[in-house]
Image (tube, rainbow, N blue to C red):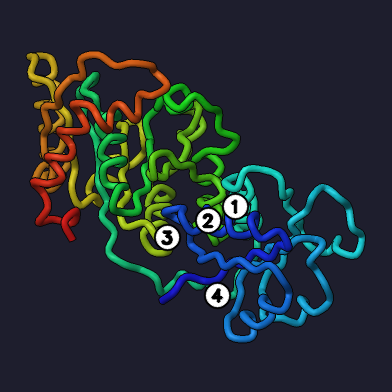
Amino acid sequence: MKKPIFAVCDLEAAYAYHLMERSNGKPGMPFEMQAFTNIKSLGLYASQHEIWILLIAAKAMCPEVKDMNIRKIMILSEGEIIEELAEYPAVYKYQSSDSLIAEVMGYYSRQEAAADPLAVMKKDVELIGVYSPVRRTLKTSFALTLGQVLAQGRTVLYINLEAYSGMEELLGKEFDTDITDLMYFVKEGNGNVIYKLNSIVQTFHNLDFLPPALSPYDIRDVTQKDWEGLLDEVVQFSTYNTIILDLDEHVEGAFELLRRCGRIYMPVREDHVSASKLAQYEKLLRRWDYEDIMEKTRKLKLPFHSSFGERGDYLEQLLWGELGDYVRKLVKEERSGPYGK
């Protein structure tokens, strides 16, 4: 089934087409955007297709639009206040395209939908877990590198559930919203979780990720059921075909989340203390009847990077450095599995 239609109509052609290209280029975008530069072409298209969201410039809005086959209308505002259009929500035109799209998705996620067009879009999704009971193993560096490598040919969502992810420092930016906001939405049971997710998700090097919680206390009340509910929504309704879970044992139901993964990567170290921690972890799995987790876990001895340049380029250096070479080789070896399909 094709994605539902998100239309943008602006008399400024360059703007409309740029927004369309940016939107359709986002890996996890649940809509297909179509751009229009006049009401006539918009009306002709709407006579043959149902439009789920229309983002239309205030200058282009006219009475004819109300009679078109459109579910939700939003105004693309240049900052002016027009009383005749006060019934419609508005977004500011001159902001980054990513911020604008996120704002539209945030609005849509709060709306009641009688039927969700994505409900029949379920497909095979590879759920990958990255976890280790041993510290200082490059676990997150590996997970981020794996995500970037896979995102070169797949739609990938990276979810970091560590107590301290360091993502803001790694990327040199602060996040206005994060996974805490999404999980509140999940716990409230408001529905349309995917649209809320798309208002929060960020991207680097084609890899989509949910900004992690700033404080581990922000998600300490999130239950195993809530985490599983989020995964179910992403698997069922999103356009991602790969989800990477970067896990920490402080997450409630961590073993159950690992059990849901099709494969698990576990970076390890060879010193005696690390080996002892690993032995304790495996003993616990056996005692609690989680042997199946061990069966699908691949232990990795990762190459420790030697020297890097500027810290701001760390993620790109991961991709093209020793660790990137290691991950590309790993993915190639597993070509007969989900990566090669």
Q: Earlier in the sequence, mark 2 or mark 4?
A: 2
Marks 2/4: CA distance?
A: 23 Å
Is residue 312 positioned above or below 68 on the image?
above
Residues at marks 2 and 1 touching, judged by CB atoms closer than 8 Å: yes
Could you tell me if residue 256 is visible in this image? no
Task: Kindly identify which residue carries mark 3.
Answer: 238
Which amino acid type corresponds to the residue marked 4 in the rendered image? Ala
Marks 2/1: CA distance?
A: 7 Å
Q: Earlier in the sequence, mark 2 or mark 1?
A: 2
Does residue 321 appear left or right of residue 253 in this picture? left
Circle 3 — which element? loop
Q: Nearer the viewer, residue 106 or 184?
A: 106
Q: Nearer the viewer, mark 2 or mark 4?
A: 2
Which amino acid type corresponds to the residue marked 3 in the rendered image? Ser
Q: Residue at x 47, y 37 (%)?
A: 211
Task: Kindly identify which residue carries mark 4.
Answer: 115
Marks 1/4: CA distance?
A: 22 Å
Q: Quadrant of the C terminus?
A: bottom left
